[in-house]
């Protein structure tokens, strides 16, 4: 009988599975609707070789998934507008003169300078012309060149969409896992993956081109809540209290974490419409 020469599979070749941590896990075990739990996990930018606009953003298997209750959530879309006519109006080019005309100060000044009296005729041609001009300018008092046409707003740009809210971490069984570990991993996702200790000059001399870019930015993440998937996002800010109810090991029992996520780029209407797409890109 031949011996079995098949070697057991190497652990490194086994598909990696992502572990879910956070106070959302006990809630799921207790039957809470999964859509009421917020999940955050890293994603990778793939298909870069496909060219601009062809990139895909897929969850990285093996990375920890953070699950927690989410409250006071807000989704902000912001665009910038301006009017190109703002400086083309006479008010913008000659603000002092136009202000004097609108307020009536200019014709009043002319009456004073030329000693004009509308009720007294004068043979002086200069006074006659000045008087006519002053009368016409007086008719422009309380008038403006501002119109609906030259106030039209023109679109200039859009900001990245922003998600802000509060993640609720509370311990049901194990504060170390449900609160401390979950928060620690989340703080890692909000931080640069690596910051070099060496200067660019030293790095360039020792490592060449790679030494000019020695640090690694924070990971891209996806945020899932209420059946919607927001990606790719960065964690712009994360704020958690360091003073809170604790157990004897110093593990916090319950905390609320303020989080703000920022999209990698500005979004258009198609990105908004595709929010209910599943994490792998197919429509639900």
Image (cartoon, rainbow, N blue to C red):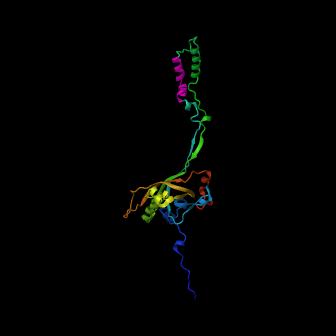
Indicate the position of residue 18 as horizontal and vertical percent values: 52, 66
- For image coordinates 56% across by 31% down, the residue present is 93
- For image coordinates 54% across by 21% down, the residue present is 107
In the rendered image, residue 100 lying in the magenta stretch gets the answer yes
Q: Main secondary structure of the magenta part?
A: helix
Name the quadrant containing residue 53.
bottom right
- For image coordinates 58% across by 20% down, the residue present is 133
Residue that protrudes farthest toward the front in the picture? 205
Residue 190 in the image: above or below residue 149: below
Label count reads 0
> Which image quadrant: the N terminus?
bottom right
Name the quadrant containing residue 232.
bottom right
Indicate the position of residue 98 as horizontal and vertical percent values: 55, 27
Residue that protrudes farthest toward the bottom in the picture? 1
Indicate the position of residue 248 as horizontal and vertical percent values: 36, 64
Residue that protrudes farthest toward the left in the picture? 248
* 67, 203: nearer the viewer: 203
Work out whether residue 204 can be spotted: yes
Work out whether residue 186 can be spotted: no
* 22, 56: nearer the viewer: 56
- For image coordinates 52% across by 55% down, the residue present is 234
213 sits to left or right of 251: right
Indicate the position of residue 141 as horizontal and vertical percent values: 56, 24
* 129, 150: nearer the viewer: 129
Residue 16 in the image: above or below residue 128: below
In the image, the segment drawn in magenta is 95-113
In the rendered image, residue 141 lying in the magenta stretch gets the answer no
> Which image quadrant: the C terminus?
bottom right
């Amino acid at each position: 009988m031949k011996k079995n020469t098949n070697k057991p599979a190497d652990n490194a070749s086994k598909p990696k599975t992502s572990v879910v941590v956070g106070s959302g896990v006990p809630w799921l075990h207790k039957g809470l609707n999964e859509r009421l739990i917020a999940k955050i996990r890293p994603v990778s930018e793939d298909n870069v070789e496909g060219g601009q606009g062809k990139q895909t953003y897929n969850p990285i298997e093996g990375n920890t998934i953070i699950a927690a209750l989410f409250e006071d959530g807000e989704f902000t879309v912001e665009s910038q507008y301006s009017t190109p006519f703002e400086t083309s109006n006479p008010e913008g080019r000659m603000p002092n003169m136009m202000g004097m005309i609108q307020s009536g100060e200019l014709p009043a000044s002319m009456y004073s300078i030329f000693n004009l009296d509308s009720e007294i005729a004068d043979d002086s041609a200069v006074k006659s012309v000045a008087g006519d001009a002053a009368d016409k300018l007086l008719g422009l008092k309380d008038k403006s060149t501002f119109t609906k046409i030259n106030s039209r707003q023109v679109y200039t740009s859009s900001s990245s969409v922003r998600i802000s809210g509060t993640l609720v971490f509370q311990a049901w069984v194990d504060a170390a896992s449900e609160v401390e570990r979950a928060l620690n991993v989340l703080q890692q996702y909000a931080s640069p993956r690596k910051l070099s200790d060496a200067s660019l000059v030293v790095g360039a001399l020792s490592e060449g081109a790679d030494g000019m870019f020695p640090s690694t930015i924070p990971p891209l993440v996806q945020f899932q809540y209420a059946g919607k998937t927001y990606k790719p996002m960065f964690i712009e800010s994360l704020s958690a209290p360091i003073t809170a109810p604790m157990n004897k090991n110093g593990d916090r029992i319950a905390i609320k974490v303020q989080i703000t996520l920022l999209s990698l780029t500005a979004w258009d209407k198609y990105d908004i419409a595709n929010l209910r797409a599943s994490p792998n890109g197919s429509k639900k």
